[in-house]
Amino acid sequence: MPAVQGTGFTYAGSLLGLIDHFGVFVPPGRTPEEMRGIPDAPQIRSVSHDFLQTMGVRLLAGRWLEPRDEGGAPPVLVINRSLAKRFFGSDDPVGQLVHLDGRMDLPAQQVVGVVDDMRQARLDQEPVPQFFVDYRQVLALTQARQMPASAQERLAFGFLSFVVRTDGHPTPMEQLVASSLTRQRFYTAVMGMFAAIAVVLSAVGIYGVLAYAVEQRTREFGVRTALGARRRDVLAIVLRQGLLLTGIGIGIGLVGAIVLTRYVEGMLYDVQPLDPPTYVGVAVLFTAVTSVASYLPARRATRIDPMTALRYE
């Protein structure tokens, strides 16, 4: 079709949450014993030779997988930036030999390219070390290791995902990205609802406390006014009390939020748990809301008639 710019396929497409490993990954200068059981073991991704280009991944060094990298060709792979940084450091990984599964008695695979990171499991998870192998070479590798046919097909094909790049807007990909954040959006909606309730309750609470305080200090405000206190002085007294309560509440809330960040970290996307703009924004919002709630009782206090206040019991 004229509108199609590129196509490809992979085992377990992006953002589906499916990952796989292929034994023990052994980079140059390391042994299988050293690499066994490491927490960030590289993930294998079986792909067609044109999958990475179709996905728009940036080539950082070396070359792409090519049609000539078929099952009988010398085994090669392309690694992502996280893998290159983690296992090669400042060395150039292109041209170096690695073993994918700790089988040092079998031919090694040559790194022919390095691509930028691509989020594969979920959009809210940081990229992890990965390498990409042509599906034909995955079949050859599994056959050489005499793996069961079911295991060969699962690693090479598994849950096939096809990608197509077109001249138009890739709406299905946008839907896939949106679906990967469904859980975070639900949590955001629920937390937003509770936050709105908290704001309303805070405003009502501040208003109630200050209204009661004004009622209790009616005689005092009358005396102040009779002795020459101006309305703005009385207004400042009440507002100062409201802002003091607000400051104490915000301070306790910020400390509690910082302590509890590790429990909500999994619910956040693209926001750091200790995000300064978020904390400042919430503090400013509550200050504004409670200032309005404080103003109403304060305004009432300025309208107290001195003679009525002096006779108040």
Image (cartoon, rainbow, N blue to C red):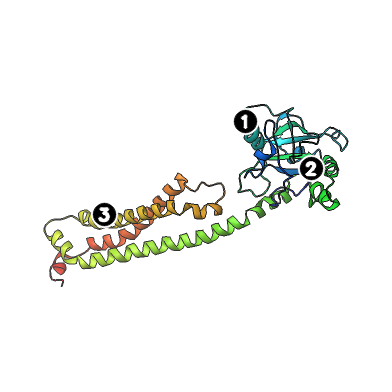
SS of the residue at dot 3? helix
Residue at horizontal 50%, vertical 62%?
A: 193
Residue with the most extreme bottom position = 313
In the depicted structure, whether residue 192 falls above or below residue 271: below
**Quadrant assignment for the N terminus:** top right
Residue 243 falls in image quadrant: bottom left
- Circle 1 or circle 3, nearest the eye: 1
- The residue sitting at the right extreme is 72
Question: Which residue is tagged 1?
Answer: 89
Could you tell me if residue 193 is visible in this image?
yes
In the rendered view, does 73 fall on the left or right side of 218? right
Q: Earlier in the sequence, mark 1 or mark 3?
A: 1
Q: Say which residue appears at 52% left-offset and 52% top-offset.
A: 265
Task: Give the alpha-carbon distance from disc 1 to disc 2, as whole Å.
Answer: 26 Å
Does residue 240 appear to the left or right of 205 in the view shown? left
Residue 61 in percent (x, y) is at 71, 28
Residue at the image point whose x is 49% and y is 52% from the top: 262
Sequence-first disc among 3 and 2: 2
Between 117 and 233, the one lying in front of the other is: 117
| Label 3–label 2 contact, CB within 8 A | no
Residue type highlighted by circle 3? Arg
